[in-house]
Image (cartoon, rainbow, N blue to C red):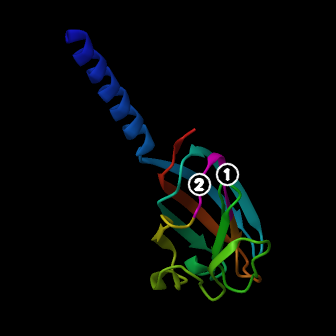
């Protein structure tokens, strides 16, 4: 009887551990700085495992040419081959990514339609987007105002859901 109880306890503990791993929620940050003229791009990546629930974008921008925060065009590529794009002003997206709203500020919050230097934040719900997988998550940012004379971007992309891989 004692052996049976120990075996059942062991099975219960293993099941709990597996369940916790299956429901693991992590927060990982990709941070970088770049300076971009109109239509220039910068690419960076982070190694993660899991499905994306939410993405927070934190931008500290200094624009010498009057660019708006919302002029920033963003591509997000997941390891499973899915991708999304949003933002920008007059630079058209390329490729087959799902367009969440591009041109004239796109899917950014209304407060991003400003030429004021400073800090901007946006939160995106990707819980039903199908973005996931194990491998490199690639972020490409483009100065989406074609004639911009330049902007300095200090960026954080905070991934909620996938864990460090």
On screen, residue 159 versus residue 145, left or right, reads left
Q: Quick one: SS at disc 2?
A: loop
Q: Which residue is mark 2?
A: 132
* Above/below status of 29 relative to 103: above
* Residue 135 on the magenta segment: yes
On screen, residue 120 versus residue 42, left or right, reads left
- For the residues labelled 2 and 1, say whether their Cβ atoms are less than 8 Å apart: yes
Q: Which residue is mark 1?
A: 79
Mark 2 Cα shell of 10 Å, populated few (<14), some (14-19), many (≥20): many
Instruction: Name which residue lies at 55% across and 69% down.
Output: 61
Q: Which is the main secondary structure of the residues drawn in magenta?
A: strand
Instruction: Name which residue lies at 58% across and 38% down.
Output: 165
Q: Quick one: SS at disc 1?
A: loop
Instruction: Name which residue lies at 37% across and 27% down.
Output: 14
Question: Is residue 124 visible to us here?
Answer: yes
Q: Earlier in the sequence, mark 2 or mark 1?
A: 1
């Amino acid at each position: 009887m004692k052996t049976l109880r120990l075996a059942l306890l062991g099975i219960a503990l293993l099941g709990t551990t597996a369940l916790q791993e299956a429901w693991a929620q992590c927060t990982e940050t990709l941070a970088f700085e770049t300076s971009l003229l109109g239509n220039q791009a910068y690419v960076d990546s982070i190694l993660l495992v899991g499905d994306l629930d939410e993405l927070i974008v934190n931008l500290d921008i200094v624009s010498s040419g009057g660019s708006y925060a919302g002029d920033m065009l963003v591509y997000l590529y997941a390891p499973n081959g899915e991708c999304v794009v949003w933002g920008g002003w007059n630079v058209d997206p390329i490729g087959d990514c799902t367009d969440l709203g591009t041109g004239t500020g796109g899917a950014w919050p209304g407060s991003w339609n400003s030429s004021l230097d400073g800090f901007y934040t946006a939160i995106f719900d990707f819980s039903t987007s199908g973005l996931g997988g194990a491998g490199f998550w690639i972020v490409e940012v483009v100065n989406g105002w074609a004639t911009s004379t330049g902007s300095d971007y200090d960026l954080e992309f905070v991934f909620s859901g996938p864990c460090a891989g």
